[in-house]
Amino acid sequence: MSLSIQEQKLYKSGLVYALVSYAAWGVFPLYWKLLKHVPPQQILAHRIVWSLLFLFLILAWRRDRVFIQYLTTPRILGTLLLTSALIGGNWFVYIYAVNNNHIVDSSLGYYINPMVNILLGVIFMKERLSRIQLIAVSFALAGVAYLTYHYGKLPVISLMLAFSFGLYGLLRKKANLQSMQGLMVETLILAPVALWYLWFMESSGVGVFGHYSLLSDSLLFIGGPVTALPLFWFGIAATRVPLSTLGFIQYLAPTIQLLIGVWVFSEPFDTAYLISFGLVWTGLGIYSYSVISGMRKKAIR
């Protein structure tokens, strides 16, 4: 069935929003590197506080009060308590990884995230793996296993990023909440701890905000829009582009991160990493093939 002119325009604009949002997430390392002089804990606290303020202003401008409903519904609030801990942990690990020269490891985490999502679906949603999905997951696990064997330790950063974001997505999917409104509540939950921590750092004489440079303060402040805007763009894209298409575009972010880590910040990418990434990429290729095949079968029916 052909799309109308209006639907084509929405689809094209949705693709642009999707590409821009994932590209923004991809270049995040460049932004966090500018704050390398700030301890990751303080960066995280500022990100939470300024994200809360920015999200509140956006939702107030849109006269959107859905987040109040989330706050007053015990079941939803309970879920958001869990997701706030997961997203806060994910943000911290990512900031730590970037500013401690582990951008390549972080990109690996987001490459294996789709495979983690499949495993979580099997464990928590009682979904059954098809043969081709099992092969895809096996390749991804082989990539992680090879890196573990070669270096004698698990790629902890990669796995923490993949599983924290995977569990976050699973809980948010089961709760079926709007993205920005949900994030508003999550940052509201985290804000008291973040504000207390910033006060404690300031009273201890080691706070950075207002004591380093105007550029540093500005970079910490724009952590709000830097966090919220890509999510806002993604939310628009999700309503105009099929999720299967977004599933392919999502690989743009870790690809940009990998290139930045290797070519901009000269992080090591030796043979062991090449083999590990190659196995993961093979798994993603097989997984993508299974998605395309599934779409074709549905179209035929």
Image (cartoon, rainbow, N blue to C red):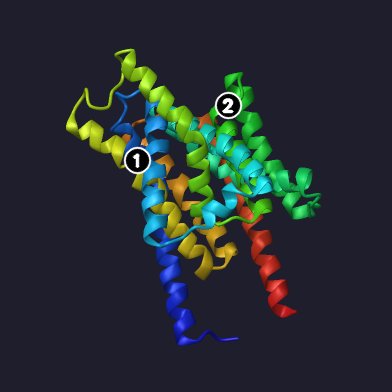
Left or right of residue 125: residue 225: left
Residue 83 circle label:
none
Q: Position of residue 295 (x, y in %)?
A: 67, 69
Of badges 2 and 1, nearer the viewer stands 1
Q: Position of residue 44 (x, y in %)?
A: 42, 31
How far apart in space, not on screen, are marks 2 and 1 (Cα)?
A: 25 Å
Q: Residue at x 67, y 42 (%)?
A: 139
Q: Residue at x 23, y 27 (%)?
A: 210
Question: Which residue is situated farthest in the left direction here?
Answer: 214
| Residue at the disc numbered 1 | 223
Q: Position of residue 201 (x, y in %)?
A: 36, 18
Q: Residue at x 68, y 37 (%)?
A: 141
Marks 2 and 1, the one that precedes in the sequence: 2
Inspect this view and state whether residue 170 appears. Answer: no
Left or right of residue 126: residue 260: left
Q: Amino acid at mark 1?
A: Gly
Q: Amino acid at mark 2?
A: Val
Question: Which residue is situated farthest in the top direction here?
Answer: 204
Image-quadrant location for residue 19? bottom left
45 to 130, vertically: above or below: above
Left or right of residue 6: residue 291: right
Q: Residue at x 38, y 53 (%)?
A: 229
Q: Give SS at disc 1.
A: helix
Inspect this view and state whether residue 76 appears. Answer: yes
| Residue at the disc numbered 2 | 156
Q: Position of residue 265 (x, y in %)?
A: 33, 32
